[in-house]
Image (spheres, rainbow, N blue to C red):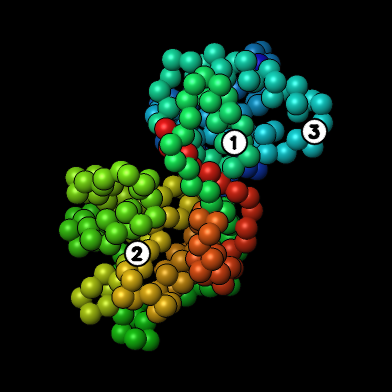
Amino acid sequence: MKITAAKEDDFPHIHDFLAPHEFFCTVLASKIRRREEGIFIVRTDSVKKDRVFGIFQLNGTLFHCFPDFTDFSKGNSGFCAAAEFCAEFMEFIKDKKIKCVSGEEKSSEFLMKLIEISGRKPYFRNSYILMTLRRTSVSDFPHILPDGARVVRAVSGDDRIIFGIQKNYLEEEVVPPGKVLSDFEVRISLRQILNSQIVLLVVKEKKVAAKLNTNAVGFEWIQLGGVYTEKEFRRSGYAFTLVSAISGRINGNGRGVCLFVKKDNIAAIRLYRKAEFSEKCGYLIAYY
């Protein structure tokens, strides 16, 4: 078992390894697609490059794909491989800074136990359900809703228009308890999203009532995020409209759609089921 930094000739093997699992590691896939720094490959054989056990990126946040941790149906061979990995990973992380672990729930739990042995425990964690949609019956993209609200796409430079709803979303859905979110952090996150992702809005009476954006574009899957409706406009069907509209477009281009939702957000889970999404696995984000 060996952990090495990914080189250019590793990426075809990485792509082949990720392909059947990309729906639960789309953010990682998007970073690999862009050839970002900090991509590591774990092999069971240092000579045979196609013997891949797992992939991860560590650049403050640990994004990962370790299918053997999510399914031990391989029996003793799976356990042995995991045992070999533990020693290698413990040595690897001993001098690495880890701010966050983000990924499929069972494999995240496994990695977090190793991180805890090294003396680090998360101060906060969020548990989610990961949901996917491979094909939807929705193909129409509404621009004007029955109540007169409009669906529009935000563009670079619209950060002032959606600053308020983005801040509300981050404070309500993302920021760990005790952390104070600065306006500067909101602006930075907005500019990054507007410059690299698709952002859809519902505008009602000159107010931004709801929003949605993609937050990761992988090889075959696109992950949605930032789904949020201002309190005064909830129960108007705006979130469902945005999710259905963008999912139809993405599916129409041959890609799958995935997202994760907090396990206790029953209303959101019902919304996504109505939009034809189905539950696939747990997803965990832990902060250190």
* Residue on which the image places disc 2: 211
* Front: mark 2 or 1: 1
- Mark 2 to mark 1: distance in Å? 31 Å
Gap between marks 3 and 1 measured at Cα: 19 Å
Residue 164, given in percent of the width and then of the height, sits at 23, 61
**Residue at mark 3:** 74
- The answer to which of 282 and 280 lies nearer the viewer is 282
The percent coordinates of residue 102 (x first, y second) are: 49, 39
282 vs 151, left or right, is: right
The amino acid sitting under disc 1 is Glu
Q: Left or right: where does residue 32 sit relative to residue 173?
A: right
Q: Quadrant of the C terminus?
A: top left
Q: Quadrant of residue 108?
A: top right
Q: Earlier in the sequence, mark 2 or mark 1?
A: 1
- Which callout, 3 or 2, points at the residue further toward the start of the chain? 3
Residue kind at label 3, given as amino acid type:
Lys
Tell me, for residue 109, which label it has, or none. 1
- In the structure shown, which secondary structural element does the residue marked by tag 3 occupy? helix
Quadrant location, the N terminus:
top right
Q: What residue is rendered at 27% in x and 62% in y? A: 165
Label 3 CA crowd tier, 10 Å (few <14, some 14–19, many 20+)? few
Which image quadrant is residue 149 in?
A: bottom left
Question: Is 146 positioned to the left or the right of 268 in the image?
Answer: left
At a point 34% along the width and 64% down the height, the residue shown is 211
Q: If you read the primary sequence from the N terminus, does the residue marked by circle 3 or circle 1 appear first?
A: 3
Between the residue at mark 3 and the residue at mark 2, the CA separation in whole angstroms equals 42 Å
Front residue (pair 74, 219): 74
